[in-house]
Image: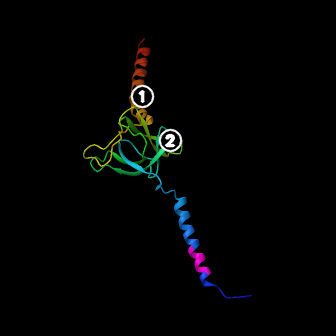
Amino acid sequence: MDNKVNYTIVGIFVVVLGAAFIVMFFWLSGTRHDKVYNTYVTYVHEDVTGLSLQSPVRFNGVQVGYVSGIELDPNNPQLVKITLKVEQGTPVTTSTVVTLMPMGITGVVYAGLKAQTPNAPLLGAKPGQRYPVIPFQPSFLMQLGKVLPELTDNLKAISQNISKKSSGD
């Protein structure tokens, strides 16, 4: 048996294996350098729990981008500023709105885009804006949460009126 080790072959093997791992890492990490994205911003006035960086952005259910930033608005801390990366060519128009949509029962949320009218002009940044701002529309659950207390108060009042009238007879 030969106990001599050819260090040149071992060195080449280590370098090739290391390069293969680096290429595989970038390939499997799903970097988004092959697509061109436009940046949009929306300002949310509701809880954004479940939304995270890299959360999907979907237009009518089709994934067209991802969330690239979530932060409090420095000018109004009641608002959350969400930065969206949307694939170039996606028809984001002046009638497009953003809604935070739950993804099943997991608590994970995605940003849903929807056009309100079919033939509106494309959305562009207004003077003084760095990126175009897509208006936010509260989710159904948030709208329901705002109406529910008023509805329960009305039901209590009706119930009390019925109780008073039935006991007064």
Query: Which region is colored magenta?
Result: 9-15
Residue 155, given in percent of the width and then of the height, sits at: 42, 24
Front residue of 162/57: it is: 57
Marker count (numbered): 2
**The disc labelled 1 sits on which kind of residue?**
Thr
Which residue is denoted by mark 1 in the rendering? 152
Residue 10 among magenta residues: yes
Quadrant for the C terminus in the image: top left
Q: Main secondary structure of the magenta part?
A: helix
Residue at position x 43%, y 17% from top?
162
Residue at position x 38%, y 29% from top?
150
Is residue 1 rendered to the left or right of residue 161? right
**The disc labelled 2 sits on which kind of residue?**
Val
Of pointers 1 and 2, the one earlier in the residue sequence: 2
Is 141 situated above or below 24?
above
Residue 4, given in percent of the width and then of the height, sits at: 67, 88
Is residue 19 rendered to the left or right of residue 119? right
**Helix, strand or loop at disc 1?**
helix
Which residue is denoted by mark 2 in the rendering? 62
Front residue of 46/85: it is: 85
Give the number of the mark in front: 1 or 2.
Answer: 2
What residue occupies the far left of the structure in this picture? 128
The CA distance from mark 1 to mark 2 is 37 Å
Residue 93, given in percent of the width and then of the height, sits at: 37, 37
Is 115 situated above or below 29?
above
Front residue of 39/73: it is: 39
